[in-house]
Image (spheres, rainbow, N blue to C red):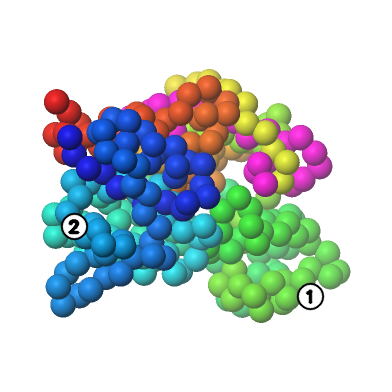
Amino acid sequence: MPRIGVIGISDGWSSQSLAQAASQATGHPPLLIEMNRVRLDLPSGRVLFGDLNLADLDALIVKKIGAQYSPDLLDRLEILRLLSARGLPVFSEPSRIMGMLDRLACTVTLQLAGIPMPKTTLTEDPDQAAAALAEYGRAVFKPLYSTKARGMILLEHGPDSRERIAAYAREFPMMYIQKAVTIENDRDLGLVFLGGEYLTTYARCKTNDSWNTTTASGGRYAPFDPPREIIDLADKAQAAFGLDFTCVDVALTSEGPLVFEVSAFGGFRGVEKARGFDPAPLLVEHVLNRIGGRP
């Protein structure tokens, strides 16, 4: 049977789950590879994890490229891109993931695909940011690299908003400013796709007075079965990226359904908690089918 490595983090539940699923499907010991322990030797073309040359594997599955989103992850993906370009099957394709780590790049792709999103402004100018906030009334300021609402703040137009914008700009010079929208029933949705096909949906529900629904802010997962038009919208959004496993964040609002983002790595925990099954074996089966590794 093929030997499959999982790119992940050692203390990540989803990374461990995927490594175990690959092991059970192939009979090989679990192989969890942390990119901060990898060496790319350009003269020889070897990509070493300990004594193992990753090029000798039959496939890699990327679950987590690092614990936190940052531009550094792009450098790690370049190493995987080299392996992919030299023939190693990597799921999802590293060059496709690169266009999703930066919130702005992801948003531009969604906009070019005609996907409805909350009104959004990008600027490095605090005066322009203040003008956008005045227009929107309330807005969420988001770092270009973050997940689970880390580094995000909700601002309301008012006497002190210009000062708070200036303080935010000192930490995040390129400001991503998105109009705050009211979501129905205090929940947003994660629609999960495997191999480009719809798999399932879960909801993230607020349980407190937080402005967002993330589990890091106290939100909880719940099952949800969306109507066909929501699935079709999410399908169109994920198709713009062509990932092997992805989750599309959708909010149901008075303005209609709006897409927040498409995730390169999310979805495992929501599926497990809300829908009662682990998607890891399904992803491994997809990879084995793609590389012709099924007996």
**Between 145 and 138, the one nearer to me in the picture:** 145
Check the image and report above or below for 32 versus 81: above
Mark 1 residue type:
Glu
Mark 1 lies on residue: 163
Check the image and report above or below for 249 versus 137: above
x then y, percent, for residue 138: 73, 55
Q: Can residue 231 be seen in this view?
A: no
Which residue corresponds to the image point at 48% horizontal and 24% vertical from the top-left? 277
Which residue corresponds to the image point at 18% horizontal and 39% vertical from the top-left? 2
Q: Nearer the viewer, mark 2 or mark 1?
A: 2
Mark 2 residue type:
Ala
Which quadrant holds the C terminus? top left
Give the distance between the C-alpha atoms of the residues marked 2 and 1, in whole angstroms. Answer: 52 Å
Which element type, helix, strand or loop, lies under badge 1?
helix
Residue stretch rendered in magenta on the structure = 192-216
Which residue corresponds to the image point at 52% horizontal and 29% vertical from the top-left? 272
x then y, percent, for residue 104: 47, 61
Q: In this view, does 5 lie to the left or right of 117?
A: left
Mark 2 lies on residue: 55
Check the image and report above or below for 30 versus 103: above
x then y, percent, for residue 185: 71, 29
Check the image and report above or below for 40 versus 244: below
The part of the image, by quadrant, that contains residue 244 is top left
Q: Does the magenta stretch include residue 207?
A: yes
Q: In this view, does 129 lie to the left or right of 107?
A: right
Q: Does the magenta stretch include residue 116?
A: no
- Mark seen at residue 279: none
**Between 86 and 157, the one nearer to me in the picture:** 86
Query: What is the residue that sits farthest to the right in this orientation?
Result: 159
